[in-house]
Image (tube, rainbow, N blue to C red):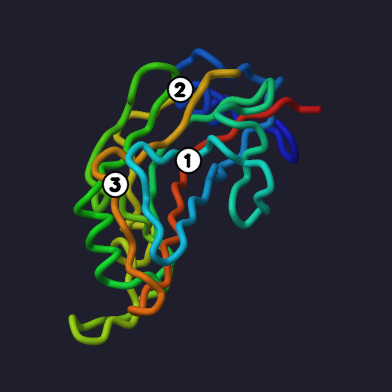
Amino acid sequence: MAAQALSSDQQTWIYNQFNGTTYQANSMDVQHEPLYDTFTTAASGTIANLSQFFTNPAGKTINQTNVTTAKRLDAPEAFAVMGIRFFYQPNILLADAVAIQAGFALEFWIGQKYYNRGLLWHYNSGGGLTGFSTVAAASLITNGSQGRIHMHELAINIVIDNQASFYGQLNGTATALTASGSGGTGATLIMLLDGLHARGVQ
């Protein structure tokens, strides 16, 4: 492990987070950090059914994604997913936020199998701006409350093994966003996987 030696208890805990299938003690650098990807649709655009995260990192900057290869971690990396978050930038129009939440479920896939599926509000982001809004004059809109205790956490980790294909997906009904002339700002959506990122020591 980089930076500092780990106790045997820490090594055992990390090993267990990866279900004993990927992590190799003393040969992996493991950090608690997220994987994330951003999906943006302009005002008056349509969010298509089966729109995906982690599938198109080309041309994105580090504030939009931290994956470099579509649907895959670079070898020999692996990731133990301990939490899944869904976030939309709070400048979204209230009507568009409601339509997106009503129109889609969020899925997390590894290979040909989904490992987590739920309504969007289930995946609280636990971050972003906080404030209040009214039906007549929405000011700030977030998915859940700010704070670590409000983040959606998994009771059972999901492990992305080395070179496994993975992605997130919006499954539901294609949703048209409000036109800019009617106050629409579009939608910037972020899917974030929180957990342990295992990398080679070199």
Q: Examine the image and state in which quarter residue 181 appears.
A: bottom left
Report how far apart the C-alphas of labels 2 and 3 lie in the structure.
Answer: 40 Å
Q: How many neighbours does mark 1 have within 10 angstroms: few (below 14), some (14-19), or many (20 or more)? A: many
Instruction: Give the residue at mark 2.
Output: 16
Asked which quadrant contains residue 84, the reply is: top left
In which quadrant of the rendered image does the N terminus lie? top right
User: Does residue 62 sit above or below 24 in this rendering?
Assistant: below
Q: Amino acid at mark 1?
A: Phe
Residue 156 pos. (x, y %): 32, 29
Question: In terms of secondary structure, where does tag 2 sit?
Answer: helix
Q: How many marks?
A: 3
Label whose residue precedes the other's in the sequence (1 or 3): 1
Q: Position of residue 2 (x, y in %)?
A: 74, 35
Label drawn at residue 174: 3
In the displayed structure, 133 sits above or below 190; it is below
- Where's residue 39, x and y in %? 48, 51
Q: Nearer the viewer, mark 1 or mark 3?
A: 3
For residue 19, what is the image quadrant?
Answer: top left
Which residue appears at 36% of the width and 44% of the height? 48
Cα–Cα gap, marks 1 and 3: 16 Å
N-term mark: 2 or 1: 2
Going by the numbered disc 2, the residue's amino acid type is Asn
Q: Are marks 1 and 3 in contact (CB under 8 Å)?
A: no
